[in-house]
Amino acid sequence: MSNTDKASEESLFRAPPLAEQERMVEALLFASAEPVSLAEMEARMPHGSDPAEALHLLRRRYEGRGVQVAKVGDAYAFRTAADLGFLMAREQVEHRKLSRAAIETLAIVAYHQPVTRAEIEEIRGVSVSRGTVDQLIELEWIKFGRRRMTPGRPVTYVVTQDFLDHFGLESARDLPGLKELREAGLLESRPPEAEGEVEPVRDEDIGDMFEDDPEAALDDEVIEDD
């Protein structure tokens, strides 16, 4: 094989310059309707490319700009800078409202995932209707997780990447704590919606999500099926 042929063969497998890789990552993120993972970038980019390094350079380039590269779960996407979110407020339309039961169920899944239906009911102190869970699954905010290796092998629930993306979270670890929720006025001491017969709940039935909220503990109710 001549030197010309060898050089031509090597050029076929040589990764493009890092600056060009950065442009490729930028194009992938811009054109994709969903966040793109590093594995997806690597599969689309030329052989030998380093999407992680290219993405690092791209994120630095967009620092301080109106649009930034945000991490959503294990993927990445272009998002409006947090401090400019008010500019988009008029374009946000609320089509569906969650019931109190759905909000409580969603919060429990987010803070306690992976969690089973029985564990959700134990924390809420109220039975969870199938419609509540189905609504959250339909919204693609929760999904089925792995089955527990316990008798009956109950299915667990976890939040989805769409949930993280909607609330601008990188992972569930970025959820606000109880103190922040109370300061924002998002936690109240109101009794939950009853879905059947009720009886006073015992202290040990309260999940650790409400352990430091005695008023919420007194207001919660438990439902037992006859």
Image (tube, helix red, strand yellow):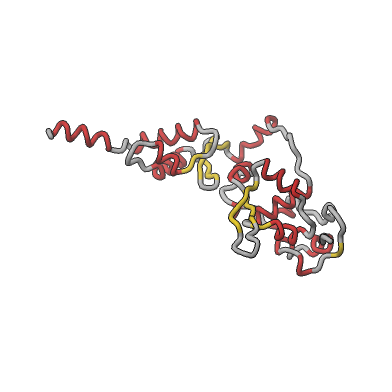
Res. 116 image quadrant: bottom right
Specify whether residue 179 is in view.
no
| Residue 8: x %, y % from top left | 21, 32
Q: Residue at x 63, y 41 (%)?
A: 166
Of the pair 15 and 202, the residue shown nearer to us: 202
Of the pair 95 and 225, the residue shown nearer to us: 225
The single residue placed furthest to the left in the displayed view is: 2
Res. 112 image quadrant: bottom right
Question: Relative to residue 26, is residue 18 drawn left or right?
Answer: left
Of the pair 103 and 199, the residue shown nearer to us: 199
Question: Relative to residue 221, is residue 109 drawn left or right?
Answer: left
Q: Residue at x 75, y 43 (%)?
A: 98
| Residue 216: x %, y % from top left | 80, 60
Q: Specify the quadrant that holds the C terminus.
A: bottom right
| Residue 122: x %, y % from top left | 74, 61
Q: Residue at x 48, y 43 (%)?
A: 37
Q: Residue at x 31, y 38 (%)?
A: 15
Q: Specify the quadrant that holds the N terminus.
A: top left
| Residue 194: x %, y % from top left | 85, 53
Give the answer, above or below, for where 195 lies relative to 17.
below
